[in-house]
Amino acid sequence: QVQLVESGGGLVQAGDSLRISCTTSGRTISSFAMGWFRQALGKEREFVAAIGWTMGSTYYDDGVKGRFTIFRDNAKNTVYLQMNSLKPEDTAVYYCAGTDKAANVYYRGSYDYWGQGTQVTVSS
């Protein structure tokens, strides 16, 4: 069984930066594709970014491309999401997810493992 625990969320102002982390246990994530999703109040959970296990390929939603960066440290079994130039519309609970299967990383149904989420609030 794989456990995912997010950390690093908080309250920031528009334009600030924040880095959130997802630490896993139970299995090494070196062969996992890892993703970040977010869910704002009253909205569907949506894709933010993902990183593949092959060649470290990265994928981003158009709304965060150029502002967010996903990267991983397999030795620490940790995936990060560096968020720059934050906007109030980035406010949401951010969830980490993982899968060890070949999958469409943009699709939340592709992921087998999920964390409990960390709140990110951006004030204007």
Image: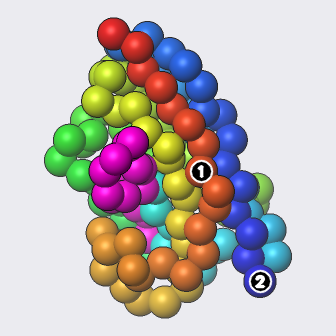
21 relative to 111, above or below: above
41 or 63, which is in the foreground? 41
Which residue is drawn at the image coordinates 41% and 82% (left, top)?
110
- Quadrant of the drawing holding the N terminus: bottom right
Res 1 label = 2
Q: Of tags 1 and 2, which is closer to the observer?
A: 1
118 or 30, which is in the foreground? 118
Badge 1 local density, few (<14 within 10 Å), some, or many (20+)?
A: many
Does residue 32 show up?
no
Q: Amino acid at mark 2?
A: Gln
Q: CA distance from mark 1 to mark 2?
A: 18 Å
Query: SS for tag 1?
Result: loop
Task: Locate residue 52, reporting x and y percent.
Answer: 44, 70
33 or 124, which is in the foreground? 124
Which residue is drawn at the image coordinates 31% and 80% (left, top)?
104
Task: Locate residue 94, reporting x and y percent.
Answer: 50, 47
Using residue 44 as the reference point, say whether residue 34 is left or right of it: right
Mark found first going from the N terminus, 1 or 2 = 2
Using residue 102 as the reference point, say whether residue 77 is left or right of it: right
To which residue does mark 1 refer?
Answer: 117
- Quadrant of the drawing holding the C terminus: top left
Q: Amino acid at mark 1?
A: Gly
Write down the region rendered in magenta.
37-53
Which residue is drawn at the image coordinates 64% and 57% (left, top)?
116
93 or 55, which is in the foreground? 93
